[in-house]
Image: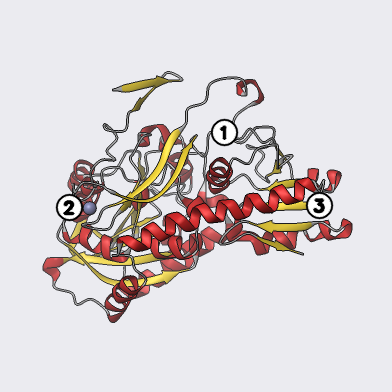
Amino acid sequence: MSDAIDGRTVPSGSEAGGTHCRFCAAPLELTMVDLGKSPLCESFLPPDRLESMEPFFPLHVRVCERCWLAQLPSFVPPSEIFEEYAYFSAFSDSWVEHARRYVDMITARLGLTPESFVVELASNDGYLLQHFLPKAIRVLGVDPAANVAKAAEERGVPTVVDFFGRTLAERIVADHGQADLVLGSNVLAQVPDLNDFVAGVSVLLAPDGTTTFEFPHLARLIEGMQYDTIYHEHYSYFSLATVRQVFAGHGLDVVDVEELPSHGGSLRVYGAHTEAGRKASHAVAELLERERSEGLFDPDRYLRFAEDVVESKRALLELLIGLKREGKQIVGYGAPGKGNTLLNYCGIRTDFLDYTVDRSPHKQGKYLPGTHIPIFAPEKIMETKPDYVLILPWNVKDEIIKQMASIRAWGGQFVVPIPEVQVCA
Ligand SMILES: [Zn+2]
C-alpha cells in the first residue's frame, strides 16, 4: 500500500522495511524510543502552505537484538531527500577544516601518491576531495544530488551523479579501476539498502586498499540523551560492534577506530579486505569492550533510554510551563533538523516559543514543519528582547552563547534542552 502525498508516492510501513532488520533480517521487536509522528525535518513551510495538509511519519526507532542495529524504516525514499540537496558542505568553515586535516592525515598514513585513486561516497560539493588536488592524487566523487555535484565539478572534483551500490561500484571499477581509498562521512546512516551499499564498497576497494567511514556513535547518542538527532533521513544508528558485523558480511574487516567530537560524538572506522589479513588495532577491542560495559548489547539499556527520553520531555515542558505562567517571553535560536524532532515530540509550538531565528536566509520568512513556529533573522532577538532563548542546535551552544551575549544587557538567559534541560545565566 502506498499513499500519494503532494504528488509524491510514499511507501507505507511494511514496504519501507521496519518489521525486520535492514542488515540481518531478524524481526524487530525491541523499541529504543518512540517519538510519535513528525514531518520531514527539512520541510520548512512558506506562509501560503500553513493551512494545507502536512505529511507526518512515525519516528519509532527499534533495535535488532541479533546485530544491535538501531533503525528507522525508510518511509521516505532517498530520491525524495537527496537528489536536490540543500546542504552545501563548503559553507561550513569548521567542516572544511575537518576535511583538510583528514586528507593530510590519511595521505601520510596510507602513503598515497599521484598513482593512487581515491573515491568519496556522498562527496557533496567536493569540500573534502578538493584537498587531494594540490597533492596530484586522482579523485572521484559520487553523489546523487546534481546541484551539489555541479559545485564539485566547478572546484575541479569529477563527480558521478548517482546513488552508490554494487551496480555503480562495478561501473566505476570498469571505467576507472579499483580505489586505494574509499571514504564516506555521514553517509552510512542515510543508506536504506545497507547491504547493497557495503557490497559496493567491497567491489570498489582494491585488494590492499583502505576504507574509512565516519558516523555518529550510538553510544554517545544514548549517553548524551541526543534523541533529537533521530530523524527520518537517518535510517540507521551504529555501534562499532554493528558496523563490524556489517563489514564482515561483505568480506571487510574493521582494522582501526578513532573517536571524534563531531556531531555530538562520532566514530571513524578503518576497513580493509578480510583477505588482506590485516590485524585489528588495540583500539578496536578496547572500544568493543566499552560498548559492552555501556550496555549496548543489553535490551534493558534501550528500555531505560526510552524512559529517560520521556522524563527529559517532562522536565523541559515543566520549565517552559513555569516560565510562561510567570509571563516570560521565550523564543528559539536556530532551525536545525534536530530542533524539529525536539519541538514536535515535545509539542512545543507558538504557545511556548513566539518565534525562532536562523542565520540561513533560505529559512528566514518560513515556518518550522509541524509546529509552525515562524523563523526570523537573528536581529529579531535584539528587537523583542525576550527573557529566555531556547538553543536548538545544542552541539554549538558555546558559539551561540558567545554570539548572543548581548541578551544579558536586558537580563535575558539561555535554555539548553539536551542532555538535560538547563538555564544558563
Ligand atoms: Zn540485525
As helix, strand or loop, the secondary structure at mark 1 comes to loop
Cα distance between the residues tagged 2 and 3: 57 Å
Residue 241 pos. (x, y %): 27, 65
From the image, tell me which residue sits under label 1. Answer: 370
- Label 3 packing within 10 angstroms: few (<14), some (14-19), many (20+): some
From the image, tell me which residue sits under label 3. Answer: 387
Q: Amino acid at mark 3?
A: Asp
Q: Residue at x 70, y 49 (%)?
A: 320
Residue that lies at the very extreme toward the left in this rendered image: 275
Determine contact: label 1, label 3, CB under 8 Å. Answer: no
Q: Residue at x 74, y 59 (%)?
A: 403
Which mark is first along the chain, 3 or 1?
A: 1
- Asked whether residue 156 is in view, the answer is yes
Residue 340 pos. (x, y %): 56, 42
Q: Amino acid at mark 1?
A: Gly
Q: Residue at x 14, y 60 (%)?
A: 251
Going by the image, does 413 lie left or right of 262? right
Check the image and report above or below for 111 versus 298.
Answer: below
Which mark is first along the chain, 3 or 2?
A: 2
Which mark is first along the chain, 2 or 1?
A: 2
Task: Point out the frontmost of discs 2 and 3.
Answer: 3
Q: Which mark is residue 334?
A: none
From the image, tell me which residue sits under label 2. Answer: 203
Going by the image, does 266 lie left or right of 353? left
Residue 289 pos. (x, y %): 29, 76
Instruction: Give the image quarter of residue 287.
Output: bottom left
Q: Amino acid at mark 2?
A: Val
- Label 2 packing within 10 angstroms: few (<14), some (14-19), many (20+): many
- Label 1 packing within 10 angstroms: few (<14), some (14-19), many (20+): many
As helix, strand or loop, the secondary structure at mark 2 comes to helix
Residue that lies at the very extreme toward the bottom in this rendered image: 282
